[in-house]
Image (cartoon, rainbow, N blue to C red):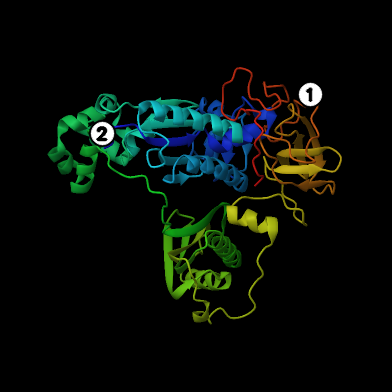
Amino acid sequence: MRTAPTVLHLDMDAFFASVEQASKPSLRGKAVVVGGLGPRGVVATASYEARVFGVRSALPMAQARRLAPNAAYLVPRFAFYRSISERVMELLRALSPLVEPLSLDEAFVDLEAGGAAWDERSARQAGAKLRADIRAVTGLTGSVGLAASKMLAKIASERAKPDGLVLIEPGTEQALLAPLSVRTLPGVGPATGDHLRRVGLHTVGDLAEAGEDELVRLLGKAHGHALYAMSLARDDRSVVAEREAKSVSVEDTYDVDIHDRVRVGVEVGRLADRCVRRLRTAGLSGRTIVLKVRRYDFSTLTRSETLRGPTDDPAVVREAAARLLDSVDTTGGVRLLGVGVSGLADYTQEDLFAQAAGERRKELPGEEAEAAASGEERPQAGAERRWPAGHDVRHSEYGHGWVQGSGLGRVTVRFETPWSAPGRVRTFRTDDRALHPADPLPLTERGPGDGEDSGDGEGDPSGQNGRGGDGRDAGGTRGGGPRDGRGPGAGAGAAARVRPG
């Protein structure tokens, strides 16, 4: 292990929910839940205000609604989240060439490799500057952990949440770990935690005292050795700049079981196209096509087919997925479908795939392709106009706003921008030709032509179709967050601009 706390772990605070709060002044300081809104949806992220009610990531959305019925429930805008994540990752790469992203909102950084830090003082300064830069560029907050290893840096960032910085001084690691729950250590999930608890091992200190031989006896050689080393704060893993993807996949869970075999086939084809878009975005191709089917009784089947060479051709992937579907019985109904590609490569061998016969379906252009690639649902301007809660719209008379909710042929929109006061709520027919899907606005600076303040701050307490706030000023002022300074997503009013997703 190192002798200086030069491993940094950044974790953005309630990232998706914080972006929504920063984007929507009426939601600042309010409970916000982002995720799938159908009966089988799950929570992707909950704001800290929602967590007070017990709402957490991966919780079934139906249960979240029971715990926090007055929260704002929004459909994710993944493309927008990615655009903001890219700005954050640029700041991390300015610190060091060794940045290991774990997700859109989380990454390790080797500060020593970039010369950004070499001792406790310089590491603390680098962490503080990073937090300030993130707030200036994105208007959001992130928590930073600094330590001599990746495991300890991640533990430190958890202790720093929300919007803080914690540095673990070298030499104090074991004393800090000893009283913590065994679930704190990576690789100790609910099952392992319960197993250890049943034999009287509750804390990390208990693991260290039990000894390596006892842990090997309880958990097996590999897990026992690793857990004992972690209990002594030993972690020599390096920060790895690039993680090689092993597969690319997409899946959908359906609100109502699909019984129609033709509909199942259409869904598999649509998922295959989305999977290929992700492959192409990553500059990859793959040889093995995988189909995942979860049936009405929760039984999950996977089927795979390995091609003669790697491809990123949507017709090839669609046809392979269709062949795999032929071997699956879907008579009782299907609740989840997924298509994936593994055996990845950075080249293709299209000449090997004469089996892709017939006319190849055209790719969806522009915004529709981006929405499908991200897995998010966009408002549709065609015959079937759907308006996902939380997504951006523009009205020819009232300007920019976001969907609070829709149903029964009506859509409720709150007209406000990231830089305005909480805006007014208005309701329209879902087929109103003056209302159109729109791109998200940058969080920290007005874009050209987006300077109008479309909200008058009065709001409409009765317009709670999407539970998007009560129209009162929650303290969200131009470029700022709640008056008391609490809660992530408060804008910093900086001059930098985030590119819309």
**Res 233 label:** 2
Q: Quarter of the image holding residue 411?
A: top right
On the picture, is 239 further left or further right than 402? left
Q: Secondary structure at mark 2?
A: loop
The quadrant where residue 406 appears: top right
Residue identified by numbered label 1: 458
Mark 2 or 1 closer to N-term?
Answer: 2
45 relative to 25 in the view: left or right: left
Q: Which of the two marks, 2 or 1, is nearer to us in this view? A: 2
What amino acid type should be assigned to the residue bearing mark 2? Ala
* Image position, residue 383 (x, y; %): 78, 57
Residue 90, position in %: x, y?
53, 43
Badge 2 density bin: few <14, some 14–19, many ≥20, Cα 10 Å: many
| Residue 495, visible in the rendered structure | yes
Q: Which mark is residue 138?
A: none
Position of residue 258 relative to residue 76, above or below, is: below
How many labels were placed on the picture?
2
Asked whether 143 or 183 is in front, the reply is 143
Give the vertical position of 142 relative to 294 (above or below). above
Q: Position of residue 179 (x, y in %)?
A: 27, 24
